[in-house]
Amino acid sequence: NEYMRVRPRENIKDKNALEEGDLVFFNNKKGGTINHVGIFLDKDKFIHTSSSKGVTIGRFAETYWAERFRCGGRHPEKK
C-alpha cells in the first residue's frame, strides 16, 4: 500500500500540524488500509491524483476527505 512504500519518519495525526510538502494519507476504500496519498499545500488544501479528474486539489473541509484522512507524514530531513 502507499503508506508502506513511502514510510514517513514522523506521523502527524493532527491536520493543523501539517506543513507545506508533508505527505497526507487516506483510506478511500473499505478495508481500513491506507491506499491514497497526496501532498499538503496549505491550510486545508492538498494535491493528489484522481482517476476521474487527474491531478487535482482537494480540501480537508470536504466531508469526503475529512472522513478518510488517516495521518500525515514528514521526512526527518525536512527543515
Image: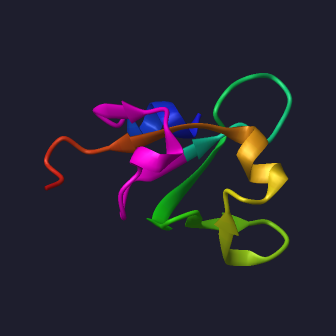
> Dividing the picture into quarters, in which one does residue 75 lie?
top left
Does residue 18 sit above or below 76 in this rendering?
A: below
**Left or right of 50 on screen, residue 26:** left
**Left or right of 44 on screen, residue 74:** left
At horizontal 18% and vertical 41% (from top left) the residue drawn is: 76
**Left or right of 37 on screen, residue 16:** left
Does residue 44 sit above or below 14 in this rendering?
A: below
- Image x and y of residue 7, in percent: 38, 34
Residue stretch in magenta = 8-24
At horizontal 48% and vertical 61% (from top left) the residue drawn is: 39
Query: Furthest residue to the top?
Result: 32
Does residue 57 sit above or below 79 in this rendering?
A: below
- Image x and y of residue 61, in percent: 72, 59
- Image x and y of residue 70, in percent: 61, 34
At horizontal 28% and vertical 33% (from top left) the residue drawn is: 9
Q: Which of 32 and 4 is in front in this view?
A: 32
Q: Which of 79 and 55 is in front in this view?
A: 79
At horizontal 44% and vertical 51% (from top left) the residue drawn is: 23
- Image x and y of residue 16, in percent: 47, 48
User: Could you tell me how many numbered marks the image carries?
Assistant: 0
Q: Quadrant of the N terminus?
A: top right
Q: In which quarter of the image is the C terminus?
A: bottom left
Does residue 55 sit above or below 12 in this rendering?
A: below
For the rendered model, the colour scheme is: rainbow
Does the stretch in magenta take in 77? Answer: no
